[in-house]
Structure formats: structure tokens, C-alpha cells
Image (cartoon, grey):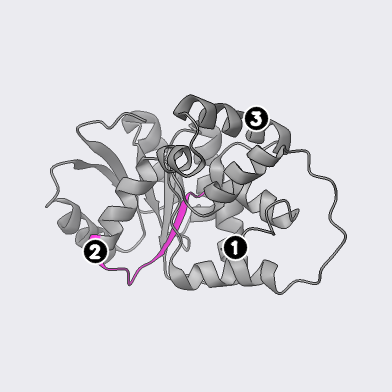
Amino acid sequence: MEEKNTIKVLLVDDSKLTLAGLNTTFKQYSDIEIVGNAENGEIALNLIKEQKPDVVLMDIGMPVMDGIQATREVKNLNPETKIIMLTSHESEQDVFDALSAGAYSYCMKDIDPEILVAVVKSTYNGASWLDPGIARIVLGNFVNKPVVKQQESVLTEREIDVLGLIAKGYSNCDISGALCISLNTVKTHIKNIFQKLEVGDRTQAAMKGLKEEIIQKNKF
């Protein structure tokens, strides 16, 4: 993806204090533009239609429409919009519901501001990021599960390699370099993966790959 001069970001949180802090943080970066603030998912959807943000920072626990439902609606409305969950919720159910709904990245609210800015930029460029504690929840769920007979994968060996790197948060350029293949070839593999797994984005592909043990053999 070609970088633009400015990344358009929408902030969604029912805490005015949180919104104020985020606005102050991002105001320091000329390549990030805050295009709106929303106190719940319903307001966020209306702003997304108007402002067409590149990235949405989404809380989970909000009135009217929570962040997980809003994420589902956003992905239906505009699949290209990247959603980062920024929340204090860390239960296994919330994590899986958010990622399954289409969130690209998952951050806790105590994240260092500089790291959050880096997450916004990397997510905009197609890479997923999970808070270390959240990553342990996700991976632990699969590492500790009983071994079951694995069905034959519908993916080719190369597609499995690509899917494994997607699950690790690699961008298209990173995958290209790691596998020594062209960027166009990477995009073709990803398109095929989405079609075969019947998913709409990278995070859903990684989650399904883990659930169906297609990429369980990879070391995370």
C-alpha cells in the first residue's frame, strides 16, 4: 500500500477523558489527522460515512452500540477501514469476539502513547498488532487445546506459509522479503487465501487458520 501524507483516524470512546488524552497525543504528529470523536458505535458509523477514516480506534464497553457490534457494522460498511480495539477489556471472550468481528489490532488502554502511534501506522499499512498479554490469551487457547485429527488443508503449502506470516503480523512487504517472492505474488496468495477460507480480512484469516489448525505447526 502506498503511504499517504496523512492517516485519517476516528476516535470512538464514551470516556471524554480518554478522548481528550488521545487527541492531545495524536496532535503532535503531522502525519495523523483526527477526523472525529464518537461516544458510541452508532455515532461512529455516521461519522465513518461522512469522514471515511483510514483507521478507527474503538473501545468495547460503550452505550447504545458497543465496540464489537460497531466493528461488525464498520466492516460491512467499509471493509477497507482498519479497526484497532483500544480498551480495558481483556477477557478471552471479548478478545475473540473483537478479532472475529474484524478488528486488526488489539491494545490495552495503558499502552505507551508512542507505541500506540506506531500501532496506528503499522495497522494502517496492513500489519496486525496484539498487546503482549492479549497475544498470550489468543495463542494459549490453541497451544493448550487437545490435539485433534487435522483435516487436509484447502490451502497450498505456499499459501500456508503466507498465512502463518499474516498471523505473526507481517505486512505484505515483510512477507515478500521473508519468502523471497514478489509483492504481486503475495497479494495473489492472500486473495486466494481469503477466497478459500471464506473470510474478508487478514485477522479473520489468521483466526480461522489457527482454529482449523492449518497453521498450528508454525511457531508463534
Find the magenta span and give its range.
102-114
Q: Which residue is mark 2?
A: 113
Q: Determine which of the numbered discs, if any, sits on residue 202 in the image.
A: none
In what element is the residue under mark 3? helix
Query: 95 and 69: which one is in front?
Result: 95
For marks 2 and 1, give the CA distance.
29 Å
Q: Based on the displayed image, in which of its 4 quarters is residue 138 positioned?
A: bottom right
Residue shown at 45%/70% (left/top)?
132
Residue 118: horizontal and vertical position, in percent? 28, 54
* Amino acid tagged 2: Pro
In the rendered image, the vertical position of residue 143 relative to residue 5, given as above or below:
below
Q: Determine which of the numbered discs, if any, sits on residue 219 in the image.
A: 1
The number of discs equals 3
Residue shown at 21%/62% (left/top)?
21
Q: Which residue is mark 3?
A: 192
Residue shown at 85%/50% (left/top)?
151
